[in-house]
């Protein structure tokens, strides 16, 4: 018995299908189904009827399974995205490495930036992992994470479609042989965003504003420097990702405009948690978590007195950047 979704797809012209569901092109390609100009006016069912039995046998596929597989893919891609409903997360304390209670309830709202500081190996990455996994007293720290003040739905933990967290790590090594434009466009189309070409333009423009060194659309992503890669992924996450929480592990070594990167994510109403050793970034956050021995030892609200140090720190940072650029350009320091 046909479902309404299957029937709708079967009656849809190939051209219409590709326009409404751009990812269908990849679907056809994955099965070796070529689409020629003369196929565009055919309905999907007529197109399938045009495939020879020998071709189907060679590809080990049949018409019904193709229709059902595409219907499943469309249903998955169109599944309601409720990540926008995340207004806050609350972290209930667990235990440090010695079993001592953290004794805290930390509430983080949409648009807030929380910095995580502490020595290497103190437990910063474990905290980020607890948030990513929406810990339910079932991780080594025994922390508990609630969403919007409530016990989270299982979809936040186990559904790929409802990805709660976008994570930006220090190392961004691309392995695909794509240009920057092809890479971003693929992301835009796979996420079914409206006006994908405009989104690609926006990501490209923002990435170049963040990056210390400009790059163009035709640059191979495997050729991007560490800073350019990080800038591209931050812009991609801000514009295209539906994940309401962004976890960043040490942005300071990426060679990008850090202040602008944070402002971009906050403007997109993301909850941002960032592990950092950078004093400028630490003062740009709303709160600062101090991690010791695997536990959250202290929560500091960044006040105006601390923020008053920012101009001086920025002046020092600008001078270091000037020296760095001089060295890059083969000049001597004086």
Image (tube, helix red, strand yellow):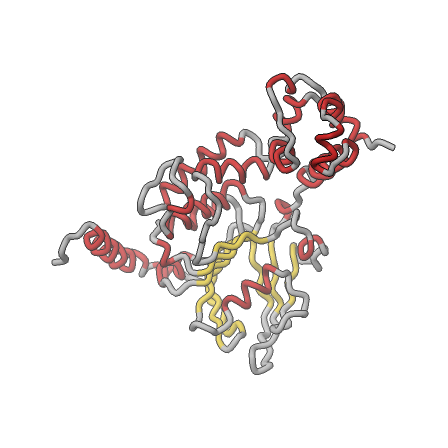
Horizontal side of residue 177 vs 62, given as left or right: left
- What residue is at 19 percent from the left and 50 percent from the top? 329
x and y percentages locating residue 221 in the rendered image = 42, 44
Horizontal side of residue 48 vs 173, given as left or right: right
Which residue extends farthest bottom?
Answer: 98
- What residue is at 53 percent from the left and 41 percent from the top? 240
Which quadrant of the structure image shows residue 285?
bottom left
x and y percentages locating residue 264 in the rendered image = 44, 45
Q: Quadrant of the N terminus?
A: top right
Which residue extends farthest right?
Answer: 1
x and y percentages locating residue 188 in the rendered image = 54, 37
Horizontal side of residue 27 vs 183, given as left or right: right
Q: In which quarter of the image is the C terminus?
A: bottom left
x and y percentages locating residue 135 in the rendered image = 64, 64
| Residue 331 vertical position relative to residue 36 in the rendered view, above or below | below
- What residue is at 53 percent from the left and 32 percent from the top? 196
Residue situated in front as seen by the camera: 256 or 54: 54
Horizontal side of residue 90 vs 172, given as left or right: right
Residue situated in front as seen by the camera: 70 or 136: 70
| Residue 129 vertical position relative to residue 205 in the rendered view, above or below | below
Count of numbered labels shown in the rendering: 0
- What residue is at 42 percent from the left and 63 percent from the top? 276
């Amino acid at each position: 018995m046909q479902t309404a979704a299957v029937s709708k797809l079967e009656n849809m012209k190939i051209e219409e299908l590709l326009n409404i569901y751009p990812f269908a092109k990849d679907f056809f390609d994955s099965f070796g189904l070529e689409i020629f100009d003369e196929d565009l006016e055919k309905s999907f069912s007529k197109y399938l009827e045009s495939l020879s039995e020998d071709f189907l046998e060679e590809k080990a596929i049949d018409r019904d399974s193709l229709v059902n597989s595409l219907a499943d893919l469309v249903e998955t891609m169109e599944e309601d995205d409720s990540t926008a409903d995340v207004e806050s997360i609350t972290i209930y304390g667990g235990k440090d490495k010695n079993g001592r209670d953290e004794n805290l309830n930390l509430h983080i709202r949409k648009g807030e930036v929380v910095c995580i500081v502490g020595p290497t190996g103190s437990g910063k990455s474990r905290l980020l992992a607890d948030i990513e996994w929406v810990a339910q007293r079932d991780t080594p720290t025994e922390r508990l994470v609630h969403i919007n003040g409530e016990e989270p739905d299982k979809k936040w933990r186990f559904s790929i479609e409802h990805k709660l967290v976008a994570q930006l790590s220090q190392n961004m090594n691309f392995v695909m042989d794509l240009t920057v434009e092809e890479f971003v466009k693929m992301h835009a189309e796979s996420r079914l965003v409206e006006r994908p070409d405009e989104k690609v333009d926006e990501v490209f423009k923002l990435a170049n504003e963040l990056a210390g060194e400009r790059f163009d659309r035709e640059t191979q992503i495997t050729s991007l420097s560490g800073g350019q890669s990080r800038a591209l992924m931050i812009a991609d996450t801000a514009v295209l990702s539906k994940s309401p929480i962004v976890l960043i592990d040490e942005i300071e070594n990426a060679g990008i405009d850090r202040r602008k990167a944070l402002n971009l994510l906050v403007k997109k109403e993301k909850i941002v948690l960032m592990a950092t050793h950078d004093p400028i970034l630490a003062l740009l956050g709303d709160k600062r978590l101090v991690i010791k021995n695997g536990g959250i030892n202290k929560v500091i609200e960044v006040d105006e007195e601390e923020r008053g140090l920012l101009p001086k720190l920025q002046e020092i940072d600008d001078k270091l950047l000037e020296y760095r650029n001089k060295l890059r350009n083969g000049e001597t320091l004086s």
